[in-house]
Amino acid sequence: MTKIHDFLWFLQHFFVSYMKGRVSDNTLLSYRDTFRLLLLYAREYQNIKESDFDIINFNPDMINGYLRWIEIERGCKPSTVNVRYHHIVSFCKFMLNEAPDIGNNIKGILNIRLTKVYPEAIPKHFTKEQIAAMSDAIDTSLPQGSRDKVIFCTLYEGGLRVQELCNICVCDVHFEQYSYLSVIGKGNKPRLIYLSKHLKLLLKNYIENLNFKDYQQTESIFRNQWGKKISRHGIAYILEKYFNLARKDSLIHFPDHISPHMLRHSRAMHFKADNIDLMDIRDFLGHSHISTTEIYAKTDGKSIQTALKTATSVLGIMEEPIWEDNPDIITFLDSFRKKKQ
């Protein structure tokens, strides 16, 4: 069998030559997990070892079985199944571009049709009162509490994704006449987040107290108890802590759980409630398409019509992967992982 017909050859070139630099680090890791799971399914349910997996095994029956497995056995939501299939489709298109005569199996995979997934009617979010209650639950008399207050307010007021928050460095915060954060969002797209007077003051005092030197401009401003860059899990832990405190001490009814992304949803929903234009919300959030932002208009019929009329008239550093003619496909996929902070 020639190298051009080897599955590992295609997979290596897809990740290293094609994907690297085109997508964000987190997206690349998501693609990696898709193929790790595929190889796990092939080994456990098709008795095909990773080292034996090849083009002949990469066929519609294998992919259909894999997609059913992650939905039924692993309990993945249909939206997650669609994401995994989208990753596989991207890989198939890459293969066809590299070798147009590769065979009907690849074209058969592209013809798989999944159930269309519609977004939920209303994204899970908090009311303004709930946001205020969680903020008030943070004890700022302690250094850790002061940090947590800035984290909470920056995540909510900035409408940030959690990884965007984790990645903020000293040089990303600009205190000028119109102060702003510069962040790199999904798909490596840069955007500016303008700061309210309240958030500007919080960030300014917080950064000044950390006393960064000139040579530390690329240091992360949010750190864990060991002085290292804070992680997504660290942010989730902090939010859950104050969520539980607020729910315990407040008479306000709260949802059953919290996730960092719910604060982003909350900011968008509050913008919408204040009659901010959907196009402005799209730009603020860094969405590529207005269709993604329209989910925040789905609260009631009247507000949907008003918002849409307004819209139509106008918001991780990775290891460098090392690859060669290595027969261990799992070792190759595992080379795509984040550096320890």
Image (cartoon, helix red, strand yellow):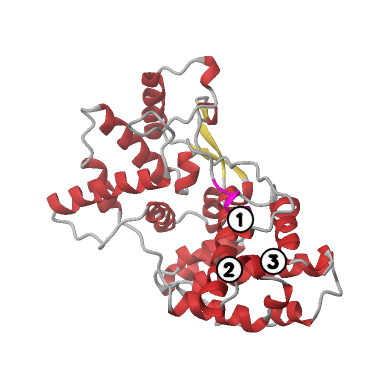
Residue receiving disc 2: 39
* Residue 316, quarter of the rendered image: top right
Alpha carbon separation for disc pair 2 and 1: 11 Å
The stretch of residues the image draws in magenta is 332-337
User: Which quarter of the rendered picture does the N terminus lie within?
Assistant: bottom right
Q: Secondary structure at mark 1?
A: helix
**Camera-nearest residue between 333 and 324:** 324
Asked whether disc 3 touches disc 2, contact meaning CB atoms under 8 Å apart, the reply is no
Q: Amino acid at mark 2?
A: Leu
Q: Is residue 336 above or below residue 206?
A: below
* Residue 335 shown in magenta: yes
The amino acid type, in three-letter code, at marker 1 is Leu
Report the amino acid beneath label 3. Ser
Other residues around mark 3 within 10 Å, as few (<14) / some (14–19) / many (≥20):
some
Which residue does the numbered mark 3 point to in the structure image?
90
Q: Residue furthest right?
A: 101
Q: Earlier in the sequence, mark 2 or mark 1?
A: 2
Which secondary structure lies at badge 3? helix
Q: CA distance from mark 3 to mark 2?
A: 17 Å
Where residue 171 appears, as percent x and y from the top left, is: 54, 27
Residue at 35 percent across and 55 percent down: it is: 259
Residue 222 vs residue 328, the one in the foreground: 328
For the residue carrying disc 2, how many other residues have a C-alpha within 10 Å: few (<14), some (14-19), or many (20+)?
A: many
> SS of the residue at dot 2?
helix
Q: Which residue is mark 1?
A: 333
Q: Residue at x 51, y 74 (%)?
A: 44
Dividing the picture into quarters, in which one does residue 110 lie?
Answer: bottom right
Q: Position of residue 8 (x, y in %)?
A: 71, 62
Are circles 2 and 1 on residues that touch, CB within 8 Å? yes
Q: Which residue shows up at 47% across the image and 49% down it? A: 161
Q: CA distance from mark 3 to mark 1?
A: 17 Å
| Front disc: 3 or 2 | 2
